[in-house]
Image (cartoon, rainbow, N blue to C red):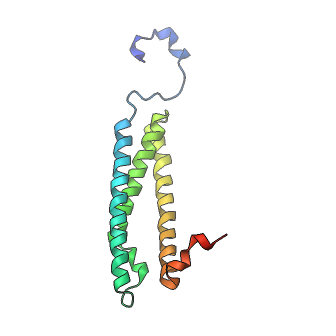
Amino acid sequence: MDFDQIPLDQLDQLPLYYIPQDPPYFLLFCGLLASLVSGLAFQAVLKQDLADWKANRQTRSITSLQSLNLLMPFLGMAIGASFFLSAGVEIFGFPPVLAYAIAVPMAFFIGWLVWRQLGSILRQIEEGGSAAIDLDSIR
């Protein structure tokens, strides 16, 4: 919609909400791509660290796997998710400041919860092996 072509006497009839001129589809795609690539890096680092821990169980605690090597790709996933969520909220008509105010805390809070859950699962594996988290036996 080109607002320059609207007569001045009809401007008060326009809706009073934000209409993005250029929805951030590129940012949406980049956020999704960054999250996916960071997720693949996270998976590779976690698999490698678990294999190293399995070989050296006596000298290394499994909770030490939550180190900077694993945190960096995890933060990449959270940052990518923040951009993805904020762009999605912007596409639905929210202004950018409000979109980021919604998406960034939500993505990082969920990321923090997942990081805590990962630590809990790693402790359970260390204490009781993989049988400690056998979900098939729970009914």
Q: Quadrant of residue 13?
A: top right
Examine the rendering and report whether any part of residue 68 can be seen. Answer: no
Question: For the point 51% across and 11% down, which residue is it?
Answer: 10
Question: For the point 45% across and 35% down, which residue is it?
Answer: 91
Q: Position of residue 46 (x, y in %)?
A: 37, 70
Decide if residue 50 is on the left or right side of residue 130.
left
Decide if residue 5 is on the left or right side of residue 105.
left
Q: Quadrant of residue 90?
A: top left
In this view, 128 is above or below 31: below
Question: For the point 50% across and 47% down, which residue is it?
Answer: 102
Q: Position of residue 56 (x, y in %)?
A: 35, 86
Q: Which residue occupies the foreground of this view, 72 or 60?
A: 60
The quadrant of the picture occupied by the C terminus is: bottom right
Q: Residue furthest right?
A: 139
Question: For the point 33% across and 55% down, which residue is it?
Answer: 37
Decide if residue 37 is on the left or right side of residue 120.
left
Examine the rendering and report whether any part of residue 49 can be seen. Answer: yes
